[in-house]
Image (spheres, rainbow, N blue to C red):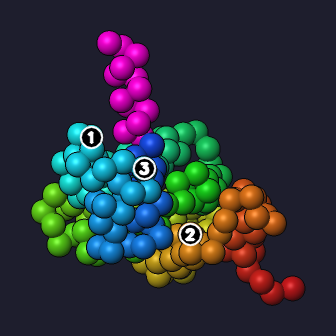
Amino acid sequence: MREETQSSATRRDELLAIAAGLFAEKGFKNTTVRDIADAAGILSGSLYHHFDSKESMVDEILRTFQEELFGQYDEILASDLDPLAQLERAVVASFEAIDKHRDEVAIFQNEAAYLLTFDRFAYLADRNQQSREVWLTLLQNGIDAGVLRDDLDLELTYRFIRDTVWVAVSWYRPGGRRTHTEIARQYLSILLEGIHR
């Protein structure tokens, strides 16, 4: 019985990975249950043995990914690292998320606005707000500690970091010329030191 449960859980994870790839590539609206079933080599009806809808699938995909990501952000904020090191660690963790969860990040970036039209995805707005608070806290801590300029527009700086980091999902490919850590370090160099000589 236990083996059967593990096998079922493994199959469920495989189906979620297939769905995540399709949602990221084709878009949530354009991906049908049949597309997912075909890619998995099963009948559409068999998919309903594991999930009641594609909405349930994307919900599980996003919740699991975000719980992990925000758990990391919470650990960073609670750590004994100095404010600059915390900011650096958050940028690196974000690139690690793009590397490890590329499909999930792409789904969130591309589909959040549409998914927010459904009540069950209201938590995505909460996650957006939580993300904003994480970055504003990191930046404010850096200013308070005297390691970041005190004339920064916090909202603008947060938006700059958010947009420049997360848009990387559109071009970054694991196994490319640079690792996600190298890219994160280059971003941090540009962010913290600028591009002037």
Residue 44 highlighted magenta (yes or no): no
Residue ID at (47%, 60%):
21
Query: Which of labels 2 and 3 is toward the front?
Result: 3
Q: Amino acid at mark 3?
A: Gly
> Which residue is nearer to you in this view: 47 or 195?
47
Q: Amino acid at mark 2?
A: Val
For the N terminus, give its image quadrant.
Answer: top left
Residue 50 image label: 1
Q: Tell me the residue that label 2 is attached to.
A: 169
Q: Residue furthest right?
A: 197
Q: Secondary structure at mark 1?
A: loop
Residue ID at (35%, 54%):
37
Q: Where does the magenta region start and end?
A: 1-13
Q: Amino acid at mark 1?
A: His
* Residue 83 visible in the displayed image: no
Give neighbour class at mark 2: few <14, some 14-19, many 20+ (Cα, 10 Å): many
Q: Is residue 109 left or right of residue 56?
A: right
Give the number of marks. Answer: 3
